[in-house]
C-alpha cells in the first residue's frame, strides 16, 4: 500500500512538472504568430496633424480633455466618458449624459487605430475629439462658444498661440452685427441660424481654431498607451528559449487559452483580433446591429458615408496631410453594400478593465462575450459568426488568457521605503489622526443631543429667507459635502467655492480666508448672509420654538426652552448645534491608509496589491523635495491648516480676492467669535493668528485644503478655477510669472507629463475607499 501511494505521488508530481514544459513547446510558425501579437512601442504617425507628437500640444490637450467648462452646465468634459480611473472608459453600457446610444471605448492605445467611433465615422483622433463638443447628448457646446472660451482665457490663449499662431478675431465684422455668443453648424436651430449669418471668412477662422483644439487633444491622447502585459513578457521569454521564466509568467490554463486563441480550427479569434493591438482595425458583422425598433444602429453602414462628408477628414481644408497623403481614405472601399450592422473590432489589450462590452454594452462580463461567440443566437440577423462548440474548460481558458493581456506597471524603482520615509508615511495615515480639539467657545460641541439637533438644522431650508436653501445646499452629503460648483450659489452667486466639510472638526480657522475662529461661528455666517441663506435671527428663533421636533431637540441639547430665550441666544445655539453635527463628519479610510499599514507591517504583497507602481510613483513624488508638496500638505489630513499664497488672489485685477488679509480684518470685527464667547473658558482655547501672519504674502493667501477626497471635491482652488486635478498640477508646474502676483511657488517644477500623471493617480487614491 505504501509503495503504491509513493508511485501515485511520483506520477502526479511528474505530470505536474511536465505540464508547463509541454505547454511551452511552440512550433516556429506559432512563435511567429506570437511575435506578431507582441506589443510595440512605436505609435503610427498622424498624417493630418502636424502637432500630434509635440509635448506642448499634449499639455494643452490634457487641459482641454479634463475641462468641463465647455459644457453649458459646466459638468461634462471628455473625461466624463473617458475616466482615467476606469481605464479611460466610464463603465456604463451606454455613456452619459442622456444615455448616449453607444458604449464609450477606451482611448488607451487609440492612436494605433485607423478609424474612430464604433462605426468609423472619423478618420483621425483629432477629428473624433471634436464631435462631443457639439453633440447635444455629450458636451453640448457650440463651435463659436468653444473657440471664444479659449480666446478669452489667458492660459489657453497663450498655449494655443504658441502652437498654432493667432486665434481668429472674434470681433464684429466692419459694419456688421456683433458675433453671437453661441453659433455652430450643429445643435439647436437657433445656434445653426446664428452660424449661417456669420460671414464665411469668420466661420473659416473659427473652424480652423476648432480643428486645432482637436489636434491638441489628439496629441494628449497619443500619450495614453498600454504597457507590457504578462503575455508580452511571455512571448519574449518563449522566443528566447527561457522556459523557466516563461512558465512563471503564464499559467497552464492561460497558455491553453492562448493556444485556442491562435488556433483557426477551433476559434475565429485571429480573424479579427490580430496584430500588436489585437485588432485588425476593420469592421465586422456579429449580428449586433439594430435595423428596427426604437434604437436603430446601422453601424458602419452610416459611418462610411459620414467620414466621407466630414469637413475635418484627412482630405479636408483643415488637414495637415500635405504630400503625405491620406492612405486610409485613398483606399477606402465605398461600394461595399454589406457593411450595415458592422462595427469596429476593439482592441483586446486591457480588455478586463473595459467592461461592459460590444458597441451597446450589452454584455457585462468577458464570460458573457465568450458564450455569445461560442453559440451565436440562431434567430439573429445574418453575421460572420459560426458556432464554436467549446467546452466549458476551454471557455475558462480563453477568459484566463484574455485577462493576461492586462498591462502590468513596470517594477517600482527603489520599492523599499527607508526608515525616515516609513516614519513620514505613518504621519499621513488616518491611523495617526488624533482626536480633534474642542470647538472653541462651544460647550456642546461634542454632545450627541446637540449633534442630532444640528443634523436636522443642517438640512432645514426653512432657516433661509426663501425657504429653499439649507446648509446642505452648498454642502451636499451626496457630493462629499460640497456642491460641485466653481463658485457656490445661494440667494445669489458667491465669490468662492464651497469646500468639503469632512474632517472640519480639525480645522483651526474656518472659511478659505480664516475669517472665523470656531466652527460654530462659521456655521452662523451663511445663515444670515444676504447672498447665501439670508435668514433673520428673529424668524429662525421663532421657527425653532414653533416646531415641536426642533424645540424638543433644542431642550435636550441646551436644557432650556427656546420659547423663553432671546432670539440672539437661540440663533447662537443654532450655530453650536450645527457645528456639533459637522464635527461628526469624518473622511473614510482609503486604499492609501491600508497601504501604509501594509508597508509598516512589512506585508509587501498586500502593499503591492493596494497601490500599483504608477500610484506609488506619485506618492514618492508627493513626498519628494522635487515637488515640495509636503511643505503644506502634511499630516493625516494632508494639510497644515495654514494660509499660503500661490498667486490665485489676482491682486489688482477685476477678480481680486485678498484672501487671508481680508479674513484677518473680518475676524477682528466679527460679532460671533471665540474670544467674545462666554463658553470659551469651558470649551477649548481660542486660536490666535501666528506672528508670521503679518507677511505681505497674506494678501491673496488662502487656507491649504485637505487632499483627502480630492476627486469628490472638484472644482479646485478658492474660486473653482480648475475643473480637474491635471489642471491644478499643471498650474503648480507653471505658476504665474506676473510680477504683480506675488506668491510662494518656485518658478517651475521640473516634472514630466508622465510624472504629473503619476501624481494625479496617487491623489485619486486619497478618495478611493474600495478594497483591492
Image (tube, rainbow, N blue to C red):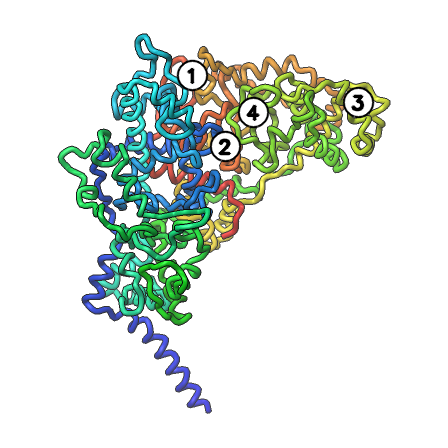
Question: What is the CA distance from the residue labelled 3 to the residue labelled 4?
Answer: 28 Å
Q: Are marks 3 and 4 in contact (CB under 8 Å)?
A: no
Judge whether residue 619 can be spotted in this image. Answer: no
SS type, badge 4: loop
Mark 2 and mark 4 lie on one chain; the one further toward the N terminus is 4
Q: Quadrant of residue 135?
A: top left
Mark 1 and mark 2 lie on one chain; the one further toward the N terminus is 2
SS type, badge 2: loop
| Other residues around mark 2 within 10 Å, as few (<14) / some (14–19) / many (≥20) | many
Mark 3 and mark 2 lie on one chain; the one further toward the N terminus is 3
Give percent across and percent down for residue 638: 52, 35
Note whether 172 is above or below 469 in the view shown: above
Question: What is the CA distance from the residue labelled 1 to the residue labelled 4?
Answer: 26 Å
Mark 1 and mark 4 lie on one chain; the one further toward the N terminus is 4
Seen at 45% across and 20% down, the residue is 648
Question: What is the CA distance from the residue labelled 3 to the residue labelled 1?
Answer: 48 Å
Q: Which residue is mark 2?
A: 714
* Pick the front one: 705 or 39: 39
Label ID, residue 542? 3
Q: Nearer the viewer, mark 3 or mark 1?
A: 3
Give percent across and percent down for residue 495: 54, 19
SS type, badge 1: loop
Seen at 13% across and 35% down, the residue is 323
Q: Nearer the viewer, mark 1 or mark 2?
A: 2
| Other residues around mark 3 within 10 Å, as few (<14) / some (14–19) / many (≥20) | some
Q: Which residue is mark 1?
A: 742
Note whether 685 is above or below 694 in the view shown: below
SS type, badge 3: helix
* Pick the front one: 333 or 733: 333
Q: Are marks 3 and 2 in contact (CB under 8 Å)?
A: no
Seen at 36% across and 62% down, the residue is 401
Q: Which residue is mark 4?
A: 488
Amino acid at each position: 500500500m505504501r509503495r503504491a501511494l509513493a508511485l501515485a505521488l511520483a506520477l502526479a508530481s511528474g505530470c505536474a512538472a511536465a505540464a508547463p514544459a509541454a505547454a511551452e513547446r511552440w512550433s516556429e510558425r506559432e512563435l511567429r504568430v506570437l511575435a506578431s501579437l507582441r506589443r510595440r512601442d512605436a505609435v503610427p504617425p498622424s498624417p493630418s496633424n502636424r502637432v500630434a507628437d509635440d509635448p506642448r500640444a499634449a499639455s494643452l490637450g490634457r487641459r482641454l480633455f479634463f475641462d468641463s467648462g465647455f459644457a453649458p452646465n459646466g459638468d461634462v468634459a471628455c473625461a466624463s466618458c473617458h475616466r482615467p480611473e476606469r481605464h479611460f472608459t466610464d463603465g456604463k453600457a451606454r455613456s452619459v449624459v442622456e444615455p448616449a446610444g453607444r458604449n464609450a471605448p477606451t482611448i488607451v492605445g487609440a492612436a494605433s487605430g485607423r478609424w474612430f467611433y464604433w462605426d468609423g465615422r472619423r478618420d483621425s483622433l483629432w477629428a473624433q475629439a471634436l464631435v462631443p463638443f457639439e453633440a447635444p447628448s455629450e458636451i453640448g457646446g457650440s463651435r463659436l462658444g468653444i473657440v471664444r472660451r479659449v480666446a478669452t482665457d489667458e492660459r489657453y490663449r497663450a498655449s494655443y498661440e504658441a502652437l498654432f499662431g493667432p486665434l481668429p478675431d472674434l470681433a464684429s465684422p466692419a459694419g456688421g452685427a456683433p458675433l453671437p455668443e453661441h453659433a455652430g453648424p450643429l445643435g439647436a436651430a437657433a445656434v445653426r441660424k446664428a452660424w449661417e449669418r456669420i460671414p464665411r471668412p469668420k466661420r473659416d477662422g473659427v473652424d480652423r481654431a476648432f480643428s486645432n483644439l482637436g489636434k491638441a487633444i489628439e496629441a494628449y491622447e497619443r500619450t495614453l498607451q498600454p504597457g507590457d502585459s504578462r503575455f508580452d513578457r511571455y512571448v519574449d521569454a518563449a522566443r528566447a528559449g527561457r522556459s523557466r521564466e516563461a512558465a512563471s509568467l503564464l499559467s497552464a490554463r492561460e497558455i491553453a487559452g492562448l493556444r485556442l486563441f491562435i488556433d483557426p480550427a477551433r476559434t475565429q479569434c485571429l480573424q479579427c483580433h490580430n496584430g500588436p493591438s489585437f485588432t485588425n482595425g476593420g469592421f465586422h458583422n456579429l449580428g449586433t446591429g439594430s435595423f428596427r425598433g426604437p434604437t436603430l444602429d446601422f453601424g458602419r453602414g452610416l459611418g462610411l458615408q459620414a467620414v466621407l462628408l466630414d469637413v475635418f477628414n484627412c482630405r479636408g481644408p483643415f488637414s495637415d496631410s500635405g504630400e503625405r497623403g491620406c492612405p486610409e481614405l485613398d483606399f477606402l472601399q465605398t461600394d461595399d453594400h454589406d457593411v450595415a450592422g458592422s462595427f469596429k473590432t476593439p482592441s483586446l489589450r486591457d480588455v478586463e478593465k473595459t467592461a461592459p462590452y460590444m458597441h451597446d454594452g450589452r454584455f457585462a462580463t468577458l464570460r458573457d462575450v465568450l458564450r455569445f461567440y461560442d453559440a451565436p443566437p440562431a434567430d439573429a440577423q445574418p453575421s460572420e459568426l459560426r458556432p464554436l462548440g467549446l467546452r466549458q474548460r476551454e471557455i475558462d481558458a480563453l477568459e484566463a488568457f484574455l485577462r493576461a493581456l492586462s498591462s502590468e506597471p513596470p517594477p517600482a524603482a527603489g520599492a523599499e521605503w527607508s526608515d525616515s520615509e516609513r516614519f513620514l508615511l505613518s504621519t499621513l495615515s488616518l491611523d495617526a489622526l488624533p482626536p480633534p480639539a474642542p470647538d472653541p467657545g462651544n460647550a456642546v460641541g461634542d454632545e450627541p443631543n446637540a449633534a442630532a439637533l444640528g443634523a436636522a438644522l443642517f438640512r432645514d431650508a426653512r432657516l433661509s429667507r426663501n425657504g429653499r436653501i439649507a446648509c446642505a445646499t452648498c454642502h451636499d452629503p451626496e457630493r462629499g459635502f460640497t456642491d460641485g460648483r466653481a463658485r457656490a450659489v445661494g440667494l445669489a452667486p458667491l465669490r468662492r467655492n464651497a469646500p468639503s466639510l469632512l474632517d472640519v472638526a480639525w480645522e483651526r480657522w474656518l472659511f478659505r480666508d480664516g475669517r472665523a475662529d470656531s466652527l460654530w461661528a462659521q456655521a452662523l455666517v451663511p445663515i444670515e448672509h444676504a447672498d447665501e441663506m439670508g435668514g433673520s435671527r428673529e424668524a429662525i428663533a421663532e421657527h425653532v420654538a414653533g416646531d415641536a421636533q426642533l424645540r424638543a431637540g433644542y431642550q435636550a441639547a441646551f436644557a432650556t426652552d427656546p420659547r423663553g430665550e432671546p432670539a440672539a441666544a437661540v440663533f447662537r445655539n443654532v450655530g453650536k448645534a450645527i457645528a456639533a453635527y459637522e464635527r461628526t463628519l469624518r473622511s473614510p479610510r482609503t486604499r492609501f491608509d491600508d497601504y501604509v499599514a501594509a508597508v509598516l507591517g512589512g506585508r509587501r504583497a498586500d502593499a503591492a496589491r493596494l497601490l500599483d507602481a504608477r500610484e506609488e510613483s506619485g506618492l514618492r513624488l508627493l513626498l519628494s523635495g522635487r515637488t515640495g508638496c509636503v511643505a503644506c500638505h502634511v499630516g493625516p489630513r494632508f494639510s497644515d491648516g495654514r494660509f499660503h499664497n500661490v498667486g490665485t488672489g489676482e491682486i489688482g485685477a477685476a477678480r481680486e480676492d485678498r484672501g487671508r488679509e481680508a479674513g484677518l480684518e473680518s475676524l477682528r470685527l466679527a460679532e460671533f467669535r471665540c474670544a467674545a464667547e462666554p463658553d470659551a473658558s469651558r470649551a477649548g482655547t481660542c486660536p490666535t493668528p501666528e506672528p508670521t501672519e503679518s507677511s505681505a504674502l497674506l494678501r491673496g493667501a488662502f487656507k491649504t485644503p485637505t487632499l483627502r477626497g480630492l476627486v469628490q471635491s472638484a472644482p479646485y482652488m478658492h474660486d473653482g478655477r480648475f475643473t480637474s486635478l491635471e489642471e491644478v498640477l499643471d498650474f503648480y508646474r507653471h505658476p504665474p510669472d506676473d510680477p504683480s502676483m506675488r506668491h510662494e511657488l518656485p518658478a517651475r517644477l521640473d516634472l514630466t507629463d508622465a510624472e504629473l500623471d503619476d501624481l494625479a493617480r496617487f491623489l485619486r487614491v486619497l478618495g478611493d475607499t474600495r478594497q483591492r
